[in-house]
Image (cartoon, rainbow, N blue to C red):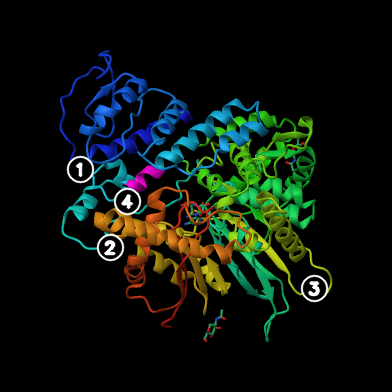
Amino acid sequence: MMFILFSLFFLFFFIYYFKSGKLNKVPVKNICNVCLKPSKNKCTNCNQIYYCSKKCQKKDWKEHRKVCGTVGTELIIPTSSSSSEMREFISDLISDDVVENFNVPDFEQEYAIKYPHEKMHIQFLNSAQSSIEYLQLIGRFIDHDPDEPDPKYIMNRWNEFSEVLINFLTTPRKIGDIFTGKMKSQYLGGKDVAAQSFSSMSKLSLTYDQGKVHIAVGFVDLDLLLQAEITQNMNFIEQPNKFIGYEGSVYAVAKTNVIKEMMVKKVPIRSIIEVWFSSVWTMETLKYFEKAVKSVLQFGDAPNDGPPNPTKKELHPKVRSLISHWNKSIRSPKSHQEAHKLWTKTFISEDNVFFIVANLVEPRDRVQVARHILTGEFPLMDDQPPKNLIASITMFNCNNGILPHSSNEFMLQMMPMDTILSKNQRKEISFLNAIYNFLENAIIKVCNWLSPLEGQAGKIEIYLHFQPVTNDNSALLVSIRQLDPWIMSWSNICDYFYVHDFHKMLRACSGNDTIHIMTSIDWFKEVFGAHIMEYDGRVRHGMLIDAQKKISMAEKVVDPSGYFQYTNVISHPYNIGDISAMMMVKENWQNYFFKDQDLNIGDFSFIPYAHTHKTHTLLNICYTYNKKD
Ligand SMILES: C[S@@+](CC[C@H](N)C(=O)[O-])C[C@H]1O[C@@H](n2cnc3c(N)ncnc32)[C@H](O)[C@@H]1O
Ligand SMILES: *[C@@H]1O[C@H](CO)[C@@H](O)[C@H](O)[C@H]1NC(C)=O
Ligand SMILES: *[C@@H]1O[C@H](CO)[C@@H](O)[C@H](O)[C@H]1NC(C)=O
């Protein structure tokens, strides 16, 4: 199924790109131009001539190329054949002057050598590899405009296809104009149908003054602490820092409470890492998990309605229900084979996570990261005896329809590449080990904060509550305000609110000088000109080159030993092009977001490029409100 989706997705792209353009009109027949057999497949360049097979198309190519449009590259996309055939076909065509080489490493082959029996995986990688190759073609036709707007493209670009939007797009407008009619809806659907297993964005490193309060709204997991530091300033408070989380996801609260308890108990770090990230656990991990679960279930009851006591260890009934379910499942975990199967089911067609693999320099790393993506194992469990392995309880044994890892998340997306890569040597440390070592050290640090030795400087207490933070929940907003938070982090919750409502909510819970930090993922869905295709066709190639240059500059700073390649980044050309586009309109959105607000802006900048990010247009935002009273 995945493969078919993959193919369909790219088929769409090709039709979209090649259908457009002013092509020579040639007679249309529904039979193969060579052998005259009935045929469903057309040359996708001119979309006019039918061929029954790639063989026939190739035979006819010398003749047909003379009449086949002006676009330059000709391909059949066989509507119903497997992608390996497609790939073979494309590589046949690539041979001569038609297109230069794609430059995509053969990670399918590399994987097949290491894991020859994983037929499904190999087939999947084959399909992923061809998809990546096809996508490279889009860059070549970036200057072309489609004749008619394509609904699917508009959905991807704006995340809606409404009358208001069409109105906006069809009336005169210029680069930087804000689409003020954007539809917003709350993230919280009530049910955790697509719960996040872990954070999906890399975070800033924070420095906490000792004794201060951090309120983490929509925390998902504890990744904010991985890079944090606690310092003692001149007049520090002789008290632990308080990290108080409010989440609308039952799953995130349940899982993170268990992980925190494992940290408090200082269980082996490997087990904490497995519970946090891995689809497959070792038996030892199950043992430590069980202990942590039992002790979390000793927490008191939080009120069913209304805000909890912020600094008490309490469980909301819904959270307790999930953790109790995990407790019951410990006796009968699923097998690790089943974990692999269930994990793969969550892939969807647009999955472009394999760009990460394609841009890695060492074949060693490509194979390991592909393995990680395909199995969800972290660390890889190749060295473990199979009978020592089970499926993650938190990932595959949830109740009430809670479905973690169903939204294409990968742990690599949240990893702070600048911190990790600059400290390691590619030749000596594999990419996955570099990440593992980072996590290990970071988690040891947090464990020590949680169970400090006598007289130790950095201390922290962590309280995690199930509680939506909204304008309707005014009792909670008041209770947050009373804590006079030093920092409040908001994940990307600003994306789900109308600007006015968002500021209203934040003001209602701000203390005297509360610093608000957040990331916007969706800001560019509100600005015309944040996408490369909204610029004149003649400047788009230049924009791509420009963006590529910007990425290349990141290399020396972020990745001195060259884990990744930066000169010819393999990605969707839109992803690259948007890096140029977003620079042009950032200020427009900033003005819109802060309009009529009395505040001090600390930061409003793009998260620096990393190959592991899901998208490359994330904005870090940080400010304080000036209070009128
Ligand atoms: C904002 S979502 C981000 C989802 C995803 N990363 C994305 O790409 O958009 C992150 C977390 O915030 C939580 N969340 C969303 N709105 C919330 C709110 N009003 N109060 C508390 N948590 C909220 C969600 O449950 C989720 O776990
Ligand atoms: C956990 O589950 C076991 C058996 O499955 C049960 O006996 C025990 O009471 C449960 N513990 C808690 C704290 O709910
Ligand atoms: C905030 O500042 C006001 C006036 O400067 C002060 O009276 C109040 O106690 C402060 N609030 C907190 C929670 O520190």
Amino acid on which disc 3 is placed:
Gln
Give the mark, 1 or 3, whose residue is nearer the N terminus: 1
Q: Can residue 134 be seen from the camera position used here?
A: yes
Residue 373 is labelled as: none
Amino acid on which disc 2 is placed:
Ile
Give the foreground label among 1 and 3: 1
Q: Nearer the viewer, residue 305 or 367?
A: 367
Give the mark, 3 or 4, whose residue is nearer the N terminus: 4
Mark 3 and mark 4: span between their CA atoms?
A: 50 Å
* Residue on which the image places disc 1: 148
* Residue on which the image places disc 2: 178
Give the mark, 2 or 4, whose residue is nearer the N terminus: 4
Give the mark, 1 or 2, whose residue is nearer the N terminus: 1
Left or right, 336 with respect to 557, comes to right
* Residue on which the image places disc 3: 456
Mark 1 and mark 4: span between their CA atoms?
A: 16 Å
Badge 1 element: loop
* Residue on which the image places disc 4: 158
Badge 2 element: loop
Q: Is mark 2 within 8 Å of ligand 1?
A: no
Give the foreground label among 1 and 4: 1
Point out the image quarter for the C terminus.
bottom left
Q: Nearer the viewer, residue 284 or 563?
A: 563
Residue 317, image x and y in percent?
61, 47
Mark 3 and mark 2: span between their CA atoms?
A: 51 Å
Image: magenta residue range = 136-140
Badge 3 element: loop
Amino acid on which disc 1 is placed:
Glu
Does the CB distance between marks 3 and 2 fall below 8 Å?
no
Quarter of the rendered structure image containing ligand 3: bottom right
